[in-house]
Image: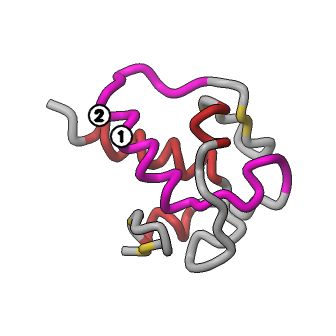
């Protein structure tokens, strides 16, 4: 498990699968925190996340306010990875465990 300096965790296998992202306002957002935020979102919502923060590689979207609120990070396995896709990975992990 990858753990960021903010205390959030995300599975290494998931972080390894997320593509690199050097564009947009989520460029340096912490992907471990994004994963945890997506996981929390998925525990509270059954509908897939949508919003104005977009990954230009996958066209996935997430709530911009949630992505903007993530702390920045330039360290660890999540370095330069897509925060929007990490958010969706967390959501998917939470929904796969839902009853």
Residue 24, numbered label: none
CA distance separating discs 1 and 2 = 5 Å
Is residue 39 magenta-colored?
Answer: yes
Q: Which residue is rendered at x = 31% and y = 27% of the image?
A: 44
Is residue 79 magenta-colored?
Answer: no
Image coordinates of residue 11 in percent, x first then y, are 39, 67
In the rendered view, tell whether residue 11 sits above or below residue 21. below
Q: Which residue is rendered at x = 43% and y = 74% of the image?
A: 2
Residue on which the image places disc 1: 40
Q: Would residue 29 appear left or right of 44 to someone viewing this image?
A: right
Image coloring type: secondary structure
Disc 1 to disc 2: CB gap under 8 Å? yes
Q: Would residue 78 appear left or right of 23 to someone viewing this image?
A: left
| Figure quadrant of residue 81 | bottom right
Q: Quadrant of the N terminus?
A: bottom left
Packing grade of label 1 (10 A; few <14, some 14-19, many >=20) is some
Image coordinates of residue 54 in percent, x first then y, are 73, 36
Q: How many marks?
A: 2
Residue 43, numbered label: 2
Q: Would residue 25 appear left or right of 86 to someone viewing this image?
A: right
Packing grade of label 2 (10 A; few <14, some 14-19, many >=20) is some
In the rendered view, tell whether residue 37 sits above or below residue 54. below
Q: Which residue is rendered at x = 77% and y = 57% of the image?
A: 27
Magenta residues, start to end: 23-50
In the rendered view, tell whether residue 62 sits above or below residue 84. above
């Amino acid at each position: 498990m990858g753990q960021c300096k903010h205390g959030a965790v995300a599975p290494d296998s998931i972080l390894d699968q997320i593509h690199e992202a050097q564009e947009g306002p989520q460029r340096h957002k912490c992907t471990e925190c994004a994963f945890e935020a997506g996981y929390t979102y998925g525990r509270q919502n059954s509908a897939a996340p949508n919003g104005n923060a977009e990954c230009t590689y996958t066209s996935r979207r997430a709530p911009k306010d949630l992505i903007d609120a993530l702390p920045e990070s330039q360290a660890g396995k999540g370095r330069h990875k897509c925060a929007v896709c990490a958010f969706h990975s967390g959501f998917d992990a939470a929904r796969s465990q839902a009853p």
